Image (cartoon, rainbow, N blue to C red):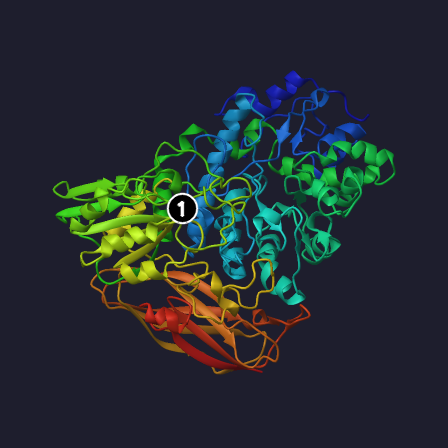
Amino acid sequence: MKNAIISCISIALFLFGCNNPKQGTTNNKQQMPDSLAGTFLDHRIDIEERLEMVIEQLTLEEKCAQLLHDAPGIDRLGIKPYNWWNEALHGVARMGRATVFPQPIAMASTFDPELIEELASAISDEGRAKFNIAQKNGNYLQYAGLTYWSPNVNIFRDPRWGRGMETWGEDPFLSGTLGGAFVKGIQGYDPTYLKAAACAKHYAVHNGPEGLRHSFNAYSSPKDLYETYLPAFKMLVTKYGVESVMCAYNRTLDVPCCGSTLLLTDILRNNWGFKGHVMSDCGALANFHGLHEYTNNARESSAEAIKHDVSLNCGSTYQNLAETVKAGLISEADIDRNLRLLWRTRFKLGLFDPYGDNPYNQLGPEVVNSEQNIQLARKAAQKSIVLLKNNGVLPLQKDIKHLFAIGPLAADVDVMLGNYNGISNNVVSVIEGVAGAVSLGTRFEYRHGFLLTEENKNPIGWAISEARGADACIAVVGINTLLEGEEGEAIGSAHKSDRPDLKLPGKQLEYLKQIRKDQDKPLIVVVMGGSPIALEEVHDIADAVIMAWYPGEQGGNAIADILFGDASPTGKLPVTFPRSVEQLPDYEDYTMYGRTYKYMEEEPLYPFGYGLNYADLSYSNAQTQKTSFQFGELITITADITNNSAFNAEETVQLYVSAQDASFPVPMYDLKGFRRETIKAKGSTKLSFTIDTSELYNIDEKGEEQYVKGSYRFYIGSTLPSERAIRLGAPQPVMVEIEMK
């Protein structure tokens, strides 16, 4: 062998600088000990050469073991154990104390990539700090590492899916833009090192039914594949440089995703040029032979995955890899290729470099759940809350004489957290937030009032009459992660965490009707949950309705900020809220026709992009620089937005396009841009969107990009340009029509 065996003690001293957090940064390089010069631990050598150096020192068995998610240490080379399985969906997860930010579906409601990037950077700061501490403590367990299996950019195609709350909504452009911002914040900005590694999951065509995910064959037409299911993944790979991709449990077009030549070779590697590593979802490779009946045994399953460059097995199927090589199903060169793909990430994270060279080693406990991050969590929650109805009762006055809070989720802190979450000692419930905001001179009371999933067992219930007697009642209802989530987590679900019925569970609606009956005092309904709920009757009886999602540890304070006007609601729905499941196609049908705002012809309860504001806003004067364009030119669409209110306002402005003359089915509307604008009181501002017309292609039934000539309409407004949104109180959008030649 080229390199001498290295002493574990010298490596520990070298790598971690005796654990001195005050040692140098990238501008203060440590001197290379003579014993390590020229080895794979020599940070002066190019990563590719270092990879070859270390691979040539490993036995076949050692190489194969490194392709498992719980990779063992290699003592003779001083290589520490590393567990690749780590989570950071909306904060460092399952690793003790960390800031808990809003659930991704809530973050999607912000329509704010700058905020998402800032938030993700805070998450990876905390993750690095916790990793540094865990390393000092000799903790190499699952969830203590830096390879985060987020974001989830699957399309929330059907509101019945229990895991939709982990996604960024139903629109590929929104999902890719916000998911990409998350990737940027997680991976950091150092020219040499990754702060942490992000992962795009679950690739691809994966969104329920949750209970069938291990055996399901998701059929997608070429049009739906390239128009809906792949674009967000493509954006993360080609535009945002995501470090890894997780292949899904299910089959897509008859082939397991983790063995798909179409998905992994043709599209991901060859078309998109992905250079990072691919991992299996946990246990997905065992499904090849166990449930998909695609292979006969674990060796054949391992061989299929390795041939498709699935470099990391979350699970245990790769425990037989050495035997698979010896049986001739794959070669040792196949193992080396995959190990190279995988370990490149460890080198980019700086796990084999001097302590002082990596600037992220300076992050310590002071950043974890810091005051700055707590306030960021509050701001994110404020911006994620969606005002669905307001007949003028909001914002409430803080000196209201008598305020009553009721509902099964009003005092619940667990409902703030969502899933794949960390743990915080700063979780604020709704009643805690309201109590902290309302006047000390206000009579403020809380009663649980009614149960979440069943009728009250006691025939005597004083809370309803007490709520009716207050000057205003805040009722907190909805669902929680006992009723929706991942396969085995929602222990209150009889449908393996999916929600085949979108209604409010139990008798919550009936109790709201009792509160409302024969009295006109304000009833404000706060809805918690991670997916659309059928709220038509709630909308009819309530004076105000807000969707608060799973808003994170500061959710209670953020909800109070909105209720009392300390913050104005600017959140927008990233997913369509149907009136009922009767408006939805069959759950197991992956065809997009009839789904999402693009193809749903029936009028929903709340449209995609919808959300009211306390300000009175109006749009006018839509223009482009000319009325006729060639494909490839830039179009700039401008419009004026006016704030008719006596206070400054912030609004989430959206741009949609609609092709009028296509000879094949195209979306009714297509989101092409969005931004947040601040408009001064009684003022107006001109806003503009610039669109590259080369991006105005549509996908035909063969899955091919087609440039449709003819008329295009561009809409600028506060929501999807639908009649329903206008009737609900959204400002009238403006439209400009151009001709593409």
Q: Is residue 706 above or below residue 537?
A: below
Q: Is residue 598 above or below residue 308?
A: below
Give the residue at mark 1. 550
Left or right: 246, with 724 as reference point: right
Quadrant location of the C terminus? bottom right
- Is residue 57 visible in the rendered structure shown here? no
Within the image, what quadrant is residue 715 found in? bottom left
Residue 44 versus residue 234: which sits nearer the camera? Answer: 234
Task: Residue 47: give x, y in percent of width and height.
Answer: 69, 38
Left or right: 79, with 132 as reference point: right
Left or right: 154, with 573 as reference point: right
Q: What is the residue that sits farthest to the front in this orientation? A: 459
Task: Residue 252: give x, y in percent of width and height.
Answer: 68, 55
Label 1 Cα crowd, 10 Å radius (few <14 / some 14-19 / many 20+): many
Residue in the image at 64% along x and 62% along y = 225
Residue 588 versus residue 510: which sits nearer the camera? Answer: 510
- Is residue 168 visible in the rendered structure shown here? yes
Quadrant location of the N terminus? top right
Residue in the image at 39% along x and 59% along y = 572
**How many numbered markers are drawn?**
1
Left or right: 389, with 549 as reference point: left
Residue in the image at 38% along x and 74% along y = 723
Task: Residue 732: give x, y in percent of width and height.
Answer: 34, 73
Type of amino acid under label 1: Tyr
Label 1 sits on a secondary structure element that is: loop
Residue 401 versus residue 696: which sits nearer the camera? Answer: 401
Task: Residue 405: give x, y in percent of width and height.
Answer: 24, 45
